[in-house]
Amino acid sequence: MIEKLDQIFVLLQQWIVGFLPAALQPVAGVVLGVVAIVCVFPGLFALTTVLERKGLGRIQNRIGPNRVGPFGFFQPIADGIKSLTKEDVVPTSADAVVHFLAPVVLVVAVFLGFAVLPMGRNMVLVKMDASLLFYFAIGASTELSIFMAGWSSRNKYSLLGAMRAVAQMISYEVPLLLASVVVVMMTGSLSLTDIVAAQNQYSSGFPHWYVFTPWGFAGFVLFAVAGTAETNRSPFDLPEGESELVAGYFTEYSGFKFALFFLGEYLAMFSISALGATLFLGGWSAPFSFLQWIPSWIWFFGKVMLSIFGFIWVRGTLPRLRQDQLMNFAWKFVLPLSLLNLVVAGLWRFLGVGWERWVVCSAILLAAYVVMGRLGMHREHFGPRRYRYAE
């Protein structure tokens, strides 16, 4: 019974496909998987928007959505209807074709990333040996869609927002990749399915998740920081800084096109959270061996939603950085520490089993964190602030 509950979606797919001729069954299976992804994650997007607005409201000592539906949970439906019925305004001087394609490219690219993520035992749409490489290759096209949006709008604020977004995403994509490379080094595979299988082991009831090692913990923190910047979330939401650039690269977007950008941002957040859980938190594996009876897909989505809670908490806590602080942090701190983590992972592999490698690897990472934090990210000494008032 427990095994059937764990594989309920796989069995349901096989049951539906079984009614079709054998020649059509592979195609039908893929179509059903695509439909499931297209339905589940936008549904999570709608739920997350309500939870985020309520959570931020509580953090800021206000209520949040509470009018539409019970406890305000029908607010996403109202927002969707509003987006569909609002006028689609396109500037006269804009490139209409590129202006239309930009949000479509963004959403399609993010959806393609879900195709290789194992969301449970035997629950992956496309199995490939280089699924991690495919994920990052597809993810790189989001920078193109953002630049398309800014350039096609023929608006200086949109173009500046797009340039800042591309600079930020490229800068933080490098440490994001390097943080993932340590997992590939230790697993010996680019397959996300193999990476989860390598962590789905237990000693004395505790899992062999990579986050419980010095290099894995450092890689997870670096991955989380770079992933936050990649998804343009606070405190790295400079591309859409309202106080500086109106709304950034989608200033000239309205109606459903704007809603697609909004959807794409949240889907990217789900995607990067799912990848982080897969690489460092064991994917769909249970946190303790005695909890393996709980369906694997529950653990996967539970880890994703826990990560989303972290995104919301950070957004309600930290202020937005300046552009120079953002880039200095990427190139002077995150990138060098990511490169050092590759060396630490190699030492961990070749020092052998024992407490010595825990001490050596932890000491190297801690020392590097302190030194680079003191030297590379030192505070500027500004003079006393003076306030002048008009007379």
Image (cartoon, grey):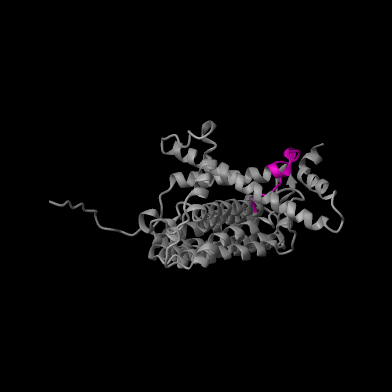
Q: On screen, 388 above or below 313?
A: below
Q: Can residue 277 be seen in this view?
A: yes
Q: Give the range drawn in magenta.
A: 280-298
Q: In which quarter of the image is the N terminus?
A: top right
Q: Which residue is drawn at 51% across and 42% down?
A: 52
* One can see residue 351 in this view: no
Give coordinates of residue 158: x percent, y percent.
Answer: 42, 63
Image check: 103 left or right of 351? left
Q: In the image, residue 111 lies at what x, y percent?
A: 63, 56
Residue 359 or 141: which is nearer the viewer?
Answer: 141
State yes or no: residue 93 in magenta: no
Hey, which residue is sitting farthest left in the picture?
391
Frontmost residue, 209 versus 263: 263
Residue 30's x, y, as percent?
75, 56
Residue drawn 45% across the image and 52% down it: 235
> Which residue is found at the position 56% from the left and 46% from the top?
308
- Residue 335 lies, in percent from the top left, at 52, 64
Residue extending furthest toward the top: 70
Please give left or right for residue 15 compared with residue 196 in the image.
right
Q: Main secondary structure of the magenta part?
A: loop
Name above or below for residue 111 compared with residue 339: above
Is 215 left, or right, of 325 in this rendering?
Answer: right
Q: Say which of 48 and 77 sits in front.
A: 77
